[in-house]
Image (spheres, helix red, strand yellow):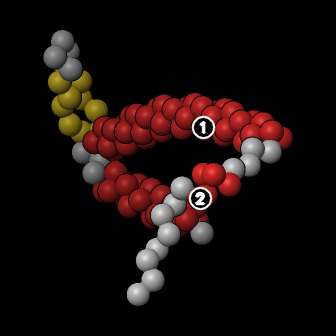
């Protein structure tokens, strides 16, 4: 359900950006520090949106890769703990009666 909402919101945002870009077709001057160019505003808007999406995509890839690495680490730790638990169960370590008797009896009122 969450993915469906993300798709719907993405489509709505794309339509809004497209309408906004189509309305603004005037030519604007862009300064690149070393050169100046005159481009239609629609290209500036769409280019900015595409660059923003590319940055978001790259950051998302980094986040997903770090989560995969964390999952592998946690799975390895889980296997190690399961192995230790199985080893302890195979030893069948029992609590001796002496350790249980160490508890102080509760006074009766």
Q: Residue furthest right?
A: 90
Left or right, 59 with respect to 83, comes to: left
Quarter in which the C terminus is drawn = bottom left
Vertical order, 1 against 95 (above or below): below
Residue 101 left/right relative to 27: right
Depth check: 48 or 19 in front?
48
The answer to whether 99 is drawn above or below residue 103 in the figure is above
Sequence-earlier tag: 1 or 2: 1
Secondary structure of residue under mark 1:
helix
- Which mark is in front, 1 or 2? 2
Q: Is residue 74 visible?
A: yes
Q: Kindly state the secondary structure of the residue where label 2 is placed.
A: helix
Taking the spot 71% from the left edge, 36% from the top edge, the residue there is 84
Direction from residue 9 to residue 36 in the image, left or right: left
Rounded to the nearest angstrom, the CA distance separating label 1 from label 2 is: 39 Å
Q: Position of residue 21 (x, y in %)?
A: 34, 51
How many numbered marks have been drawn onto this rendered protein structure?
2
Q: Which residue is mark 2?
A: 101
Which residue position holds label 1? 74
Residue 67 or residue 14, whichever sits in front: 67
């Amino acid at each position: 359900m969450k993915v469906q909402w993300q798709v719907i919101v993405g489509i709505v945002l794309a339509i809004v950006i497209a309408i906004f870009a189509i309305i603004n077709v005037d030519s604007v001057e862009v300064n690149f520090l070393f050169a100046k160019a005159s481009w239609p505003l629609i290209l500036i808007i769409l280019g900015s949106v595409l660059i923003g999406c590319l940055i978001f995509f790259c950051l998302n890839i980094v986040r997903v890769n770090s989560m995969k690495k964390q999952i592998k680490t946690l799975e390895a730790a889980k296997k190690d703990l399961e192995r230790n638990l199985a080893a302890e169960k195979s030893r069948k370590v029992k609590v001796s009666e002496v350790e249980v008797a160490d508890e102080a009896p509760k006074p009766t009122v």
